[in-house]
Amino acid sequence: MSERKYWYILISMIVLVAIIFALPHVVTAVRTNGEGLIRIISTDDGYYQAHVRAALLGRYGEVTNGMTGGNPAARGAAPAFFEMIAGTVFAPLGLKAPQVMMILTIFVTPLILLFLASFLFILFEDRRIALVGSGLYTLVFLSTLQKPVNMSLSLPFTILCLLLLAYIWKKQQPLTIVITGVLFGILPSTFVWSWTFVWAVTAWLIILTFFAPHIADKRRRILSLLAVLGVAFIVAAPFLKDLFLSTGDPIFAEAALRSTLVHSRSVESIPRTIILTLLILCSLVLVHRAKWKESALFPLAALLGIFACMYQNLVHGVILTFSSHYYPFVCLSGLLMMLWAWSIKFIPQRPQPRRAAAGFVLLLPLSVIGLASIFLLAGLYDYRSAWDIIRGEYYIRNIQHLAPAVQFLDDGYRSAVLTDKVSAHMVTTWTDDDVLFTAYVKHLLVSNQEYAERYCLTEIFDPSGPDLRWLGSEVTEDQNPLTIAQWQETFGDICKPVLKNPATFLKKYNVTFLLWNEKLRPEWKIDQRLFTQVKSGEGWSVWKVR
């Protein structure tokens, strides 16, 4: 394939993905006559866009929060580097967080094809493989790439880091080593699953380069990779120090439990573990029989790296929320090994091997390709929601009618708004106000006492009261009915004074407004001794604390 044809196809693929990402927003605008809100597919969208909103408003100290603001102040347990950068860059334009993320998703995220194709070309030096591999991977993750920040920004950035790592491994240039080390050092401030994977791949690449025979410039390559990690540690040191100090805070332990850091030395999925183990074993045998070709080392390092990340809990006993968050990298590692197995011209070591042995040897590449394909097919199925737009199900949150409400609340004055945990995302992404509670308050460094108080105050209008079983299940790692029942009792005691005297807690959390999503929560009964209505529309009303 000529270089000109390669670039023509690659650019066309990038433009096509950008159009696909823009299409849902166009459909939303048509269906709402341009008066609706940019779609939110999941509460994850609102969570990350709230971080961007904080940066857009210049509230840089609150970017990791973005929800409850400073009343009282509480920071999030997770970093928010991309949100900080996005908000800072777009702040002069006066855009809202969903608009910023829409622009970035359409014009920046599709560059993952450019990064991935370049990465594959460096590894395999074949333009056809680069195009097919990048197209296949993007197709599998077409849905998750549309999610704000993670994965729309973090996944392309991670691929860029791997691209630079592969370039350094091939050509050791000092300036590129420094740049790559800086980017590696930024990774811990973005997404925990990204930086642990990339750093693990680098470590395994060093090990394989050291032990593999017949590798040119072995010493120089190892020193270059070590230099990258050295620069990365220096850049990441402030973040890692802050993380280490935070773990000693009792509130951090409570937030970690709410965020589902599961204490376990078992595997989450037995079938996935079996398939991944078989893929690694087949790959090791294939690489060995191929006499440890240089082109095999990076794919093998990626495969061993993701295995170490997926099952690190076997060593330290903690599952980092869900190992399923590593799945994009499981598929990427499998794809690399699959493409390598496809690309090699394998010749058995023995001139005339026995028929059975020869058959076994020739089946190895097919075994690797088949096992890796299972992960890609599973990913294509798991992330099939990208095609929901075809069925008209691209919008699943019943909040489009709140557009006039958030316009009313976005009045230039910062207030704390009480609303349900779904509608709260509209406030934290479209207005300059804070909210009392969303489901993601569990990720903030607040006590379980405050977490429960905020939730129960949000549910004072529901005649059936707060759902204490749901609240209890949010702070347990094993979902044991007995454990949940104990938390129900604890939270019930916390909620009693809130339900008995809500005015005290409205004052405690500086609540100014109530946004009632009448369409979503028709059962609510507003206590007009506490609130007076100031604005209403179709399916919503805004009330002010008396």
Image (cartoon, grey):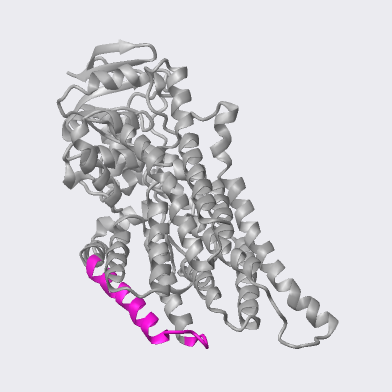
Residue at figure coordinates x 77%, y 88% from the top left = 351
- Front-most of residues 99 and 454: 99
Q: Quadrant of the C terminus?
A: top left
Q: Quadrant of the N terminus?
A: bottom right
Residue at figure coordinates x 25%, y 28% from the top left = 431
Left or right of 359 in this view: 470: left
Rendered location of residue 278, percent (x, y): 65, 70
- Secondary structure mostly seen in magenta is helix
Rendered location of residue 540, percent (x, y): 35, 16
Res 348 seen here: yes
Left or right of 350 in this view: 34: left
- Front-most of residues 389 and 213: 213
Q: Quadrant of residue 268?
A: bottom right
Left or right of 133 in this view: 165: left
Q: Quadrant of residue 489?
A: top left
Q: Is residue 265 above or below residue 492?
A: below
Q: Which residues are magenta?
A: 211-235
Outermost residue toward the right? 355
Rendered location of residue 385, percent (x, y): 55, 38
Left or right of 70 in this view: 86: right
Q: Is residue 274 above or below residue 400?
A: below
Rendered location of residue 526, percent (x, y): 31, 18
Q: Is residue 89 above or below residue 212?
A: above
Residue 222 within the segment the image draws in magenta: yes
